[in-house]
């Protein structure tokens, strides 16, 4: 069974540019969440996708958007990059059945640097 | 803003010593998870606790969820260098699984 894989592992972008990060969820998982982890901080919830729809969002502006595909893989898009967007972006997947939520499996993350 | 406060922020101990990490909040959580994160990697789930007063043991690690489901602790007995890492607590507040993370406790165990 494969875990959560994220690509790319590292990325350098210029302020104002747009970026797309990708995530393949663990086999059998139907829910994907994205987190932003700034240096020295814990992860901050961005949003969650379940059955291809966003069903929860943290305190992030609309320029952070996402998609989930029929195979449960996901993308995180960030427009108009700002210097403060520099962080480790983590994707986490889980199997959600009705009201039950199991533990999350995290990917190794994408390190985004905005210059 | 971190709703979960972890203490201490940093802990350096010798191999064989015991340590306790605390996770406190003014909010009630439906579940609380502990993760360990190593440099360049994502967090790895250690345990999930859901019942107030619950105690779970995982080899040398003991996890406790407070009676009011607002706080938790992680105790490591006879720490080993392989226990080195960033320990994160995360609280769940709804059935959809959004997690609120603490800032983490960096644990260093030296031989």
Image: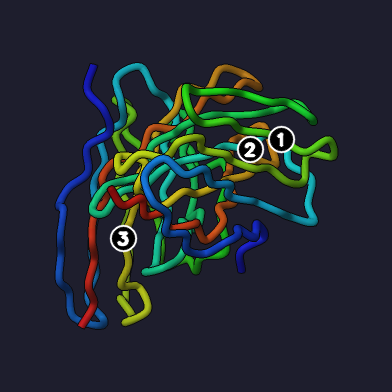
- Mark 1 vs mark 3: give the one in front: 1
Q: Position of residue B28 (x, y in %)?
A: 79, 45
In the rendered structure, find residue A88 and report the number of the disc placed on it. Answer: 3
Using the image, name the chain to which the residue with label 3 belongs.
A
Q: Residues within 10 Å of mark 3 (few under 14, many from 20)?
A: many
Chain bearing mark 2: B
Helix, strand or loop under label 2: strand
Horizontal side of B5 relative to A51 (left or right) equals: right
| Chain letter behind tag 1 | B
Cα gap from disc 1 to disc 3, whole angstroms: 29 Å
Residue at image location 41% in from the left, 36% down from the top: A32
Q: Is residue A104 left or right of residue A68?
A: right
Q: Give the image's coloring scheme.
A: rainbow
Residue A76 place in picture, x, y as percent: 33, 53
Residue B88 relative to residue B65: left or right: left
Give residue B17's position: percent from left, percent from top. Answer: 47, 44
């Amino acid at each position: 069974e494969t875990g959560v894989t994220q690509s790319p592992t590292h990325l350098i972008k210029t302020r104002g540019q747009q970026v797309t990060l990708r995530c393949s969820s663990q086999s059998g998982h139907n829910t994907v969440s994205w987190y932003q982890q700034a240096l020295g901080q814990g992860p901050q919830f961005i949003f969650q996708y379940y059955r291809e729809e966003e069903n929860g969002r943290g305190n992030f502006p609309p320029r952070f958007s996402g998609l989930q595909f029929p195979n449960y893989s996901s993308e995180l898009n960030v427009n108009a990059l700002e210097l403060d967007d520099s962080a480790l972006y983590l994707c986490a997947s889980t199997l959600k059945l009705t009201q039950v939520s199991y533990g999350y499996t995290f990917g190794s993350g994408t390190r985004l640097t905005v210059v | 803003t971190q709703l979960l406060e972890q203490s201490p922020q940093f802990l350096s101990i010798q191999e064989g010593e015991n340590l306790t990490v605390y996770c406190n909040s003014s909010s009630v959580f439906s579940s609380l998870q502990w993760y360990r994160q190593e440099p360049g990697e994502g967090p790895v789930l250690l345990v999930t606790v859901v019942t107030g007063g619950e105690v779970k043991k995982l080899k040398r690690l003991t996890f406790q969820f407070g009676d009011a489901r607002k706080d938790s602790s992680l105790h490591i007995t006879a720490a080993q260098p392989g226990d080195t890492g960033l320990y994160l607590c995360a609280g769940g507040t709804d059935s959809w699984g959004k997690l609120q993370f603490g800032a983490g406790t960096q644990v260093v165990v030296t031989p």
